[in-house]
Each structure stands twice: as C-alpha cells, then as structure tokens.
Amino acid sequence: MEQQYNPKALEEAAQTHWLKHNSFAVKHDDSREKFYCLAMFPYPSGKLHMGHVRNYTIADVIARYQRMQGKNVLQPMGWDAFGLPAENAAIANNVAPAKWTAQNIDYMREQLRQLGFAYDWSRELATCDPDYYRWEQWFFTKLFDKGLAYKKKAEVNWCETDQTVLANEQVVDGCCWRCDNPVERREIDQWFFKITDYADQLLADLDTLDQWPEQVRTMQRNWIGRSEGVELTFDLSGQPLQVYTTRPDTLMGATYLAVAPQHPVAQQAAAGNAALAAFIDEMSHIEVAEAAMATMEKQGMDTGLSATHPLTGESIPVWVANFVLMSYGSGAVMSVPAHDERDFEFAQKYGLPIVQVIDKRSSDASASCAYDASNWQDWYADKTDVVTINSGQFDGLDFQAAFDAIADALTDSGKGQRAVNYRLRDWGVSRQRYWGAPIPIINCDGCGAVPVPAADLPVVLPTDVAFDGVSSPIKHMPEFYETQCPKCGAAATRETDTFDTFMESSWYYARYACANNSNAMLDAEANYWAPVDQYVGGIEHAILHLLYSRFYHKLLRDEGLVDSDEPFIRLLTQGMVLKDGAKMSKSKGNTVDPQSLIDRYGADTVRLFSMFAAPPEQSLEWSDSGVEGANRFLKRLWKLAHAHVAAGPAPALDSSALNDVQKSARRKTHETIAKVDDDYGRRQTFNTAIAAVMELCNELGKLDDSDQSRAVIDEALRAVVLMLNPVVPHISHALWPLVGGSGDILDARWPGVDASALTRDSIDMVVQVNGKVRAKMSVAADAANTELESMALEQDNVQRFLEGVTIRKVIVVPGKLVNIVAN
RNA sequence: GCGAGUGUGGUGGAAUCGGUAUACACAUCAGACUUAAAAUCUGACGGCUUAACGGCUAUGCGGGUUCAAGUCCCGCCACUCGCACCA
C-alpha cells in the first residue's frame, strides 16, 4: 500500500470500481426492506455550489448508512431543468436555453460523479425532456376532465414598456429590472389547480408526518390557514356585499367596510368618481407579491357608498383600502377599529369612528384595562377574559358565547352563516414564458378550451428558437400554435403559456422509480419504491415545493397511480451554506467553488468537512482552514491504519487479558459504535458522529504496541472504517481490505456493539453544594444512594462549603451528581 | 408587515429527557524535529483572580420557575428563511 494518503488516485480507483460493478443500480427485491433516499434535484445552473455539495452529501451518507443496515437502497438523481435562469442566460450568452441547459447538465453530472455519490444513474431524468413532461401534460388533461384544472383571470406584474409579464424577482423596488419603469398589475387568463379542494386533507395529513420537522409542519399549517368564522352580507342599496370574519363577536363594533381596489364595488364607484378612479389606478402600480402589499403604507379612500349593518340597520361607509387582498375571502372586510390593529390605524388616519365592543374582564386588579381610542393595546384583540359591551342584546358575553349568538342571529335573519375559510389559494400553473412545458390545451372559437388528446402528446416545446429575452418565442411561432380543434376540426390555436416549474418538481420523485417506462406515467415499480423514505433539501422549500408535492401525490393517488397518501415519510431540511456570515452569492463575491477544493484535497475531504462543520439543519459557516483540518484527519487515519498493518498481523483479542487502559479503549470503541449508529440513524447529527470517531482515533493513537493493545486497535480500526464509510466512502473503500475487511465495504454490515465491553466498574460523579460543583469523586458503579450521599459529604472541599450552614436536602441523581442544599 | 427559526470561547460547534457548560475541530501561542521553512508530533488555550489549592464570573439582553436552566416560561434585541411568477 502507499505510505502517503493520495486522494486523487484512490478516489478514481473507487469510482472506477463502482462504475465497473454497477454498484448503485437497484431493482425490486422483496427479500429486503426497501429504502428510498432522495435529495432535492438541482436546477442545472452551470456548476455545483456548496449548497448542492452539502445537500447531496447528507443524502449520500444516509443512503450508504441504510445500505449497511441491509436495505435495498434507491438513490436517484436528475435535473429540474426548466426555468427562468436559462432564459436569462440565453440573452446574456446568446445561446438557446435547451443547449445551455444540456451543457450545464453534462458538466454538473461529472462533478457529482467526482464527489462519489451513490446514484443509480440508469434512472436519471431531466424535466425538459419531452419523455418526462409528456406525462405531466397527460395528467393535466386528466385533471381538466375532473374539473380540478380550470381557467380564471388573475393578476400578474406587467411591464408596459417591454409588453411582458414579470416574475416577482424581476421587480426591483416596484420597477422592471430591465427598463426600470414602474410595473402595473394586469389581469390575464390563467390555469389553476384546485388545491383548495384538498385543503382539509393537506391539513389533516400533516398530523401523520411525525418524521417531519415540527417547524415545517407548523409553517404549512399556517400557510393553509384554516379558520372558522362567519360569512355575512351587508346591503349596499339593494346590492349584496359579502364579507368574511373570524370575529363575529365584534360585529357590533364594525364602523366601516373596506374593499380591495380590484373589487367590483370599487370599480363601479370609480366609474362616476374621478378622484377614486385615480386612487385605484395609483394602487395598481404595486407589485403582486404579498410581502410588498404588507409592507407598503396603508392607504384608502371613501367610495361615497354606504352599506347597511345587518344587525343594527345603521348605515356605515364603504372604503377602498390598498391592503385588502382580492385573493383572500371575498375581497372585502368589515372593519372593527376598536379590536383590530390594522383597522385601528386606518381609522385613526382617516378619522373614522371607533366603537369599543369588548372589554377586558381581568382577574388581575393591577392590570390597566381602561380602553383608550388613541393608543393601541394588545388586549383590544383578545379572545380570552373578555366580555362584550355596547352590543345591545349581545352584551355581557364571552368570546364564544358572543360568536355563537351573533352567528345565530345572522343565520336566523338570512344575512349570514357560519363558514370555514382558508388562507390557501388555488395554485396558478400558467407562466407566460418560453422555457417550460407547454400547456396541452387547444383554444377553439366554437368548443372553447379543449385538452390535447393523449395520442397527440407530448406537445413538444420547439428548442431551435431565436430568443430575444423579452417575450416567449412560441408566442410568435404560427407553426407552433396554429392547429385544428381536436373536437370539431376547425382551425384553432394552441395555448402558448407553459407550466410553472413546480409542476415538474411535484412528481419527479415518483417518476425515478420507473424513469424508463414509455407507456405510462407511473407503474407498479413506482408504487414499490414510493413513498420516499428520506427526503433531503433546503429549508427554503418548506412551504411551496413540499406543499405542492403533497398535493400532487394525492392527485396521483386519486387517479389510481400510487397507493400512499403522502410522498415523503421522513424529511430533513438542511440549512444554508454561509461565508463570512452571509449567503454565498456572486454579487457579494463570497462564493467558494467546490471544484477547486475537490481538485486540491479530494472529494472525501470536502464531504467530511461539509458534514463535520455543523449539524445538517443549521446554517453552515464555510471555513477554508476547517477544510484543511478535515484533510489532516484523513491523513492521520491513513497513517494510523498503515502503521498498524505494517507491524504485522495483530494477535487475537482476549478480553479477559486486557489492562485498564486497553479495557477503556475497547469500551470507547463500542460506545462509539452505539453513538454513531444513533447519530446517523435517529438523530441525523453527522457532525457529532464524526467528532466521536475522531475522539476514538485520538484514544487509539495513545495505546502502546503490546499484543493486546494491537488486538484492541485491530478491532477498532475495522469499526472506524465502517463508521466513516458513509461520509468518506473512497478512503474507506481503500482501507477496508487493508484492515481485514472482506468483500465490498458498500455491502458490509454495520458493526455490532459488544455489550460486555460497555460495562464499567467505576463512574465519575460530581458533588454540588447549592447547585455549584465543589468536588468530583470516583464511585463504584453499583453504589447505593445512601453510600453516594455519605461519600459526597466526606469530600474536603464540600465540607468547607458546609461549615456554619444547615443541610436542608440532598438530591442524588445516580450516575451523575449529588446536590447538597444547605443554608 | 405576517409566519417559522437561530443566537454558547478568537472561529465552526458539543452538551440527545432540566443534572459536571465549552466535547471535537479551526485559529493562536509555546516546545520538539530541521541549516531553515513547510509538514509532522507534544503541550497550553473563555474572562477576572490566586504562589498554589481554589474562588468569582460567563451560553444575545432583561425578568421568572426550579435543589439545579444553554435547555422550560414571559418580555425585548439582532440575524436567517418563506410570503404564492427565483428554484
């Protein structure tokens, strides 16, 4: 063997071995438990960045670890190949998106190969491949037939100068990124999926995802935003105006209504009111992103209309307010300024009346609960310990009683009813872009929107196009859009919009299982591998991608394509990779290129550092010197193994002949196996697993070269190589036969823990006086509590602190500490 | 603005169920080896204090619960992620 650790040579040798033996290709096998491990596939942006390296290393560690548990492990890889950056690159580099994407895929595939990831490449897919997106088009037509895909008008960011739709990220400070002109909102026809039909299931099934991070489940719950309230109707001179509220208990305090600028009532009023029309027009120059809506200055204007309060019959004004979302509820809200903070601010700004209708019923006499209409207090919006006032017949009720009484009164008078509302909106899947899967619809003057028949799929996106970067080429290609109606045969036009790229990423995990099936979207193989046992990806996908995938999986299930309810059993959300405390980005100039590190140190070092520097869920601060440290450890490991082997075969281990130091080293070996097993499998804290192996190696290095020491080292080295194999598979592949392992380490079984090696005769315990550590003592492992107590009291330094005080209590925590409470 | 997180030495982090704070690394310093440097090996390493034993103090800030709090509760501050057309 080579004396020097030479990563370049040994990594190439390992990768060649895997390639030659087709080591990661898997198939259906009922004799073993299946394990489907998946990392979110990359957008082929050009080259791998550190976030990719981290993501794919985490998944690879899990995949290789599970394989060592004897499971049939599938780990595929592919490309999320449609999207905006290809269009931007097309303009910048004058290269067609298809060609640019294909080149990037080729380069990045080679990088992944160099990192040694255990992928079954025979299942590779790229979403821009018609063989992939044809099934998505086919599935869309199924959903269309079921009424789950429908068309409606929706707002987009529109740049009048460029005559094009802008993505939210293409709007900078309310202006177009290309020409810097203010964007406006424009309504256009768009296709939607009825995800709201599945809101209840998506919410309820979150409870079954007990192997997902709680924070992700909470975020999804809040995003779905189920609320129970009342839908009620205000009369607007004979015309009904519907509002939804979760606080009917405060209805008697509603002093005005607020409608969105896009609301038909606002539009009607503006027709005869130039000032209002100008205001509404001004409000249309705000990008559609909700964050922009929520942070802008709250503005409004009186429509001059008034509505009749459904309970009091009083007349209240109707205002247009820029913060009312047309897309939530009915686009109109009742405003109760005394008990809603935003309404409160708005009423103060425009001098609208404020009527207090709930009062604090505080048990705490010192609490100041006097109502003051000039300053907002949190308790104004409370639902607990409150009582209704100024509400006529509804006075004196708590939240629930008032809610019920008012909801009943509205129901009885036919002016409203209880209703469940969701914050979740239907999923808009249309994009007015070129580089995406064409929406398989033909628009016919006579027949309307007609889905493309299955036999005519896929609708292939032309790739040999001239791209000006502003508008989609297929919108100007009669040879693409001119066609005949499949129903009546009349001349008709194809839809030129393409799908949202979340469409492709919502079902790719299932397609990997039958990637080469050209006859069906999914088959029995897909059902064998699905659901994914372990999914790994960035926390930034916590809501959208993961919610859409969950939805899509239920759609696939309802179409009979899979049996399971959820796509991902266990989820690991990895943190960001930072450099100098900030996210790596070209604009900040703080990027680290993984390629140069691979070239310099080898893949194992890069993998090791990525896993060692931080737990996977936290952000990871990149450190060049930390990488050197990782490399140093691998060199030491190489030397340790080499030195051991060079001294000749180790004698057989005789556990009864070990001295205390050897016994301790052997105990450490088996404790480490148990810990690393737990860290990889249950905790998924790879950093602590690596630290534990480093500790073990440090201890092994201190053993002498006596026979039994060498026997202990011999056993430990095999365990070390097995434990490190998931993280640094190349060096492990090379060391495995050297330290006496047989067969391919890929399929070696995880080392077993010898329980007899774990026993200890004595334990170190701590003695505290009033919670402060005052002494340490070594005690027999089986010492009784009373014995521990008296030993603790005997300690010199403990006695010092007990002088002149009375012992009140002694707390013994076996195996840990004795705390003496005295004063 | 709303929703969800994070905050521990000079740095990355550990402390898994409320029980010895700072494991494992990085950096730095000192020593060994060397003509020298690199590499490697050994040792020191939160702060204040002590000749030493030891003591005091410290987990973003301010309170609280507890025999015991980095961990639980309340209130702040800072940063990160998401907000539906970036992926």
Image (cartoon, coloured by chain):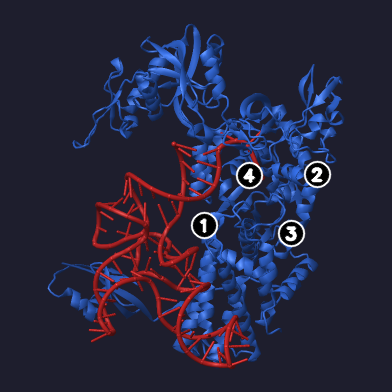
Q: Residue at x 23, y 79 (%)?
A: A797
Q: Secondary structure at mark 4?
A: loop
Please give left or right for residue A239 compared with residue A152 in the image. left
Circles 1, 3 touching at the beta carbon (< 8 Å):
no
Identify the residue under disc 4.
A564
Q: Secondary structure at mark 2?
A: loop
The answer for how far apart the CA atoms under marks 1 and 2 are is 36 Å
Circles 3, 4 touching at the beta carbon (< 8 Å):
no
Of residue A784 and residue B69, the one placed in the foreground of this image is: B69
Q: Colour of chain A?
A: blue
Of residue A347 and residue B16, the one placed in the foreground of this image is: A347
Identify the residue under disc 2.
A96
Q: Earlier in the sequence, mark 1 or mark 4?
A: 4
Instruction: Name the residue type under label 2.
Output: Ala
Identify the residue under disc 1.
A581
Question: How many residues crowd mark 2 within 10 Å: few (<14), some (14–19), many (20+)?
Answer: some
Instruction: Name the residue type under label 3.
Output: Val
Percent across and percent down for residue A696 are 52, 77
Is residue A612 depicted above or below A541 in this figure?
Answer: below
The answer for how far apart the CA atoms under marks 4 and 2 are is 40 Å
Percent across and percent down for residue A479 are 87, 30
Quadrant for residue A437, please give it.
top right
Percent across and percent down for residue A463 are 83, 41
- Are marks 1 and 4 in one subunit? yes
- Are marks 1 and 3 in one subunit? yes
Q: Earlier in the sequence, mark 3 or mark 4?
A: 3
Please give left or right for residue A634 compared with residue A118 in the image. left
Q: Quadrant of the C terminus of chain A?
A: bottom left
Q: Earlier in the sequence, mark 2 or mark 3?
A: 3
Q: Colour of chain B?
A: red
